[in-house]
Amino acid sequence: MPKVVTQQVEFEGHFFEQTVVIEGDDITPWGPEKEFSVVGQPHTRIDGSERVTGGAKFTHDIHLPGMLYGKFLRSPHPHAQIKKISTSRAEKLPGVRAIFTYENSPEIPWRMGLTKLFDKRIRYAGEEVACVIADDESICLDALDLIEVEYEKLPSVVDAELALENNAPKLHEAGNLVTGKPETYARGDVEKGFKEADVVVEGTFRTQVALHNCMETHGSAAVWEGDNLKIWDSTQHIFGVRDMVATALGLPKHKVRVIKQYMGGGFGSKNGAGKYTILAALAAKKTGRPVKILLDRREENLLAGNRPSTLQIVKIGATRDGKLTAIYHKCIANEGAYAAWVAGSTGPSTRMYACPNVKAENFGVFTNLGPVAAFRAPGYVEGTFALEAMMDEVAAKLGIDPLELRLRNYAEVDPTSGKSFTTKGLRKAYEIGSEMIGWERRSQIKKQNSTATKKIGFGMGSQIWGGSGGPPAYSVVKINNDGTAVVLTGTQEIGTGAKTAMAQIAAEVLAFPIESISVELGDTQIGLYSPLSAGSMTLASVGPAVRGAAEDAKKQLLDVGSQVLNIPIEDLVIENGDFLNKKSGERTPVKKIYEKLQNYMIVGRGARGPNPADKVVNTFGAQFAQVEVDIETGKVTLQKIVAVHESGRVINPLATRSQLEGGIIQGLGFALCEQRFVDPHLGLVLNASLETYKIPTMMDIPAIEAEMVNMPDPDVNNLGVKGIGEPPIIPTPAAIANAVADALGKRIYELPLSADRVLNTLYPSSQNERSS
Amino acid sequence: MKNFEYVSAPNLASAITQLQGSNSKALAGGTDLLTEMKERIKTPDRLVNLKSIHEMQGVRDDKDKLWIGALTTLSEIESHRFIAERYPILAQAAYLTASHQLRNAGTLGGNLCQSVRCWYYRHPDLTCWLKGGETCYAQEGINRHHAILGNAPCIAVQPSDLAPALIALDAVVRLKGDEVDGDLSLDEFFVLPDEGLRQRTVLGKSDLVVGVSIPKPAASSRGIYLKSMEREDWSFALVSVAVQLNFAGSKVGTARIVLGGVAGKPWRAKSAEAVIQGKVLNDSLAEEAGAAAVAGASPFEHNGYKVVLAKNLVKRALLELNK
Ligand SMILES: Cc1cc2nc3c(=O)[nH]c(=O)nc-3n(C[C@H](O)[C@H](O)[C@H](O)COP(=O)(O)OP(=O)(O)OC[C@H]3O[C@@H](n4cnc5c(N)ncnc54)[C@H](O)[C@@H]3O)c2cc1C
């Protein structure tokens, strides 16, 4: 029965109260003792062959007859006012079908009303000025050259600290502070805590802007069928795109259908519609033809989102025996031109350790740069790097082993609420991980393998994150008259393997072979509402609804089967797609009963139940890194990384391992080589290409030893699963940076740990010599 | 990309004639030129395909020297038996260049004639000094990849990995065209740009590189190519060093030390060569040579690290060869 309740909901480290309708809490959770045949087994992707044979259709693959293409004219200036725009020359170019500018486009509020679809005020280089629709992209590009724009250049600011100064150029009327105020947190009394401390350490950290660089760039294709709008969008949130487009164009939601079957990565940057989506829809309307607009790599890297750079101050006090007495963490994040939320990094400092006195302040700053977007565990990657560095410094000052210091401050309950955790496998993760890396033997390994020029070091980092998922999320399971079953949901597969996990869940419940299960998703018109695939919440939200639907379908199947076969329902089970009479041992294929039932169809219905009200759901993990630093070339080589995470029950160990590896690889890129560069005077991004923005290559990836603490969570949902998409990136940079500090005997407070930083740290006199 | 005319040249002479057209560019593998065209940094009206020119193809062993045609791909150089055996530093340099895919398409001639990678030059919204503008933005900007040696109005570095290796091997380049014609030491082929000539090679508009020839090394000759990058693969050099030494017993006979990534052209470190000539290599001598190689360096705000890096790489290369 549906129940209306108000719930505390967490999304990417932020907490909200929400009124939700709760269903599906009548299903007994799968406890730790439950035995499985499909769940928990490694399973290759059910859509793997489509993916590797090119059959899978991504948004980029959508080609419709008569399709037109679009490209944006983008501002070359970081801050400007458009005085005049003339498109007449461009319009005359053969093949050009439409040109949109602020003069002929609807005034659609954008980015929470901070700007418009086409704003005369330009707030970053790369911002949209006009959009050309033409027969192909190369005509679009030629046409862009013919559009004449008169800009009045305005003074710009790209540095967050400078943007906070009184006389800084203002991006928005209300000033350069995002939401007008810092986001703060406090418990206990930090001043008192620092007074009680025997040692106090303090550090100032800087982290860089990282770019998502999804393999598939952002883009949409749109076509009108009568007054129905159909959109293919490379998105993590089909329902979100639907709602944004409907609102922007003033359409009823059901007139907008959003489809996304396959996607080449999102990492948080594809949580809603883009201007390309709206323009594709507007242009399709205007021309009466399908229109596709895709970003190219450069556009992707200028404006499709980023992990904001941070300046962080972390101060920690501890007693002689290693008990934390106070943590102060301040963060200034450079959020670019538009943001609706303060992108802070202090979350780990408030939630990781059992420290009575904590104060955190987050300042989000507007600057003349492409806007921020959530990026795999936003804030936590940066914050964990700073926090865990300071933990190591406390450990060093006190002569306590870094791991031991963490154990002495282990939070048995959630330090922010005092509530207990549903499950917390961090102690186990520390134990297994330290064993795997040889933590106890590390001084010996260092001694044996370091040379005069190459120094070995070890470091670790801990991880806390959300990942509970939650309602609302729905699913239907249909059993076809050929004995196959279809799982229908409205979620989207963003490349994580959620589809396979849902098939495993349905196969487990129905006791059907997994080959007989298909999963339909990624379509707002036929799917059932499911949340966005972000915040590590897809499987933990939708998976339980799938189980509910499968249980419902199975109940009906047994009921009908018992009547058709004339076997008491107590004696009937399903096994490997057959009815099995427990008494007689007789088997009947499921499809057999349908022969007598015309086109009878079973439809099971499921919904995600509530999250526990009296407990806190978090995911945990620990990583340990071994690095080699070449002190002559400044090169850091990650030799080995061990990752052990706890995220409830593991549905598919193979897919989970992929998530761990992917997170670690992205994390090592952040630690060692990825960095967006901006010219401070010109306000221009200098490395918007894959050649200049350095993502790790296969050759940069070391041996990754990854394991899960399989710890079914009895309270989070009926599967016992929590999310694992974001957690693995969180502690990687911290572990690597601590290992580098260990190798050098000197800490570098900035990321990435590129050769120039290492050399400048080792040879300080080489810095800042200037030529005449 | 702007529309352009495409012609295939049957032979050298015809290519040179075709290149005299108003705004023509020679096309080899296209791995550099096409990216510049896509970014609208170069907008030629006509591309003259060189791939059909027989005279520019092939690797030939001519008794006392090795001839490598300009159209030879980097992959061929990397895996050619003669080259691996006799000129390992060239094979190493080729192997460390770009990525597999790029090496399959990119050619020797294109590699020597490629444009600089400076991100101000490559920025579609900027007209820097090298592109005919007034300002070298890198000098006051983010210059972490830029030159520490050789004062020039443009501080972009010469990006080629093959060039330092070939110069260390004393290679001679064969040129054919209107303005330059004949053989030239590869060292002299590269120039620092100046007001009069905003380019990095001696080539005129319709001049072509036909190939390079490398003298056969002495039996006692040993070489090494070291390259420091921002990641393990598919990256231009932060700094690289090519060293080729002829030994006379335990002593260094003649030495050639060439640095990449430090100047607007491959940087022959003659003073470093002088430090070791006629001496037995050891730690302190290698250190001294490293210091000599970067003496006179004048780094900018973000590239001071290159001084240390270049010095250490020279030292490391010498010690490796002394093993
Ligand atoms: C992502 C990336 C990474 C790279 N990394 C490296 C690296 O690490 N190290 C490195 O050394 N290089 C690197 N390169 C450069 C690469 O090696 C060159 O692009 C390639 O060698 C050029 O050869 P091509 O035949 O494709 O030249 P093209 O693109 O065809 O031509 C390049 C230029 O040379 C001219 N040209 C070509 N042939 C001749 C000739 N015979 N005579 C006169 N002019 C000629 C053309 O007109 C053009 O101006 C990289 C390139 C890319 C795109």
Image: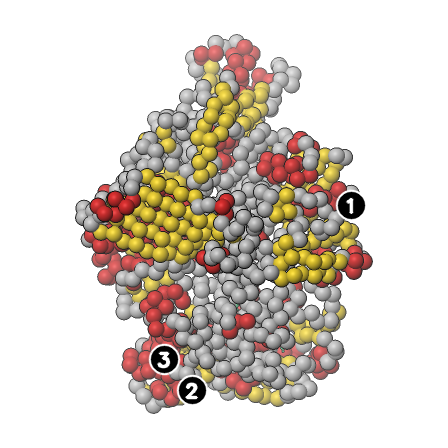
Q: Do the residues labelled 1 and 3 touch (CB within 8 Å)?
A: no
**A623 to A629, vertically: above or below:** above
Q: Position of residue A70 (x, y in %)?
A: 70, 51
Q: Which secondary structure lies at badge 1?
A: helix
Q: How crowded is mark 2: few (under 14 residues within 10 Å), some or many (20 or more)?
A: some
Q: Please indicate whether residue B2 sits to the left or right of residue A474 in the image.
A: right
Query: What's the residue type where badge 2 is placed?
Result: Lys
Residues flagged by tags 2 and 3 on a common chain: yes
Residue positioned 56% across, 44% down in the render: A270
Q: Mark 3 points at which residue?
A: B290
Residue B270 image label:
2
Q: Which secondary structure lies at badge 3?
A: helix
Q: Which circle's residue, 2 or 3, is located before the other in the chain?
A: 2
- Viewer-side residue, A125 vs A703: A125
Query: What's the residue type where badge 1 is placed?
Result: Thr
**A35 to B1, vertically: above or below:** above
Q: Residues within 10 Å of mark 1 (few under 14, many from 20)?
A: few
- Give the chain letter at badge 3: B
- The image quarter containing residue A670 is bottom left
The mark tally for this picture is: 3
Q: Which secondary structure lies at badge 2?
A: helix
Q: Distance between the residues labelled 1 and 2?
A: 67 Å
Q: Where is residue B159 in the image (x, y as percent from the top left)?
A: 52, 73
- The image quarter containing residue B11 is bottom right
Residue positioned 58% across, 70% down in the render: B121
Foreground tag (1 vs 3) = 1
Q: Mark 1 points at which residue?
A: A287
Residue positioned 61% across, 20% down in the render: A601
Q: Please indicate whether residue A392 sits to the left or right of residue B56 in the image.
A: left
Foreground tag (1 vs 2) = 1
- Give the chain letter at badge 2: B
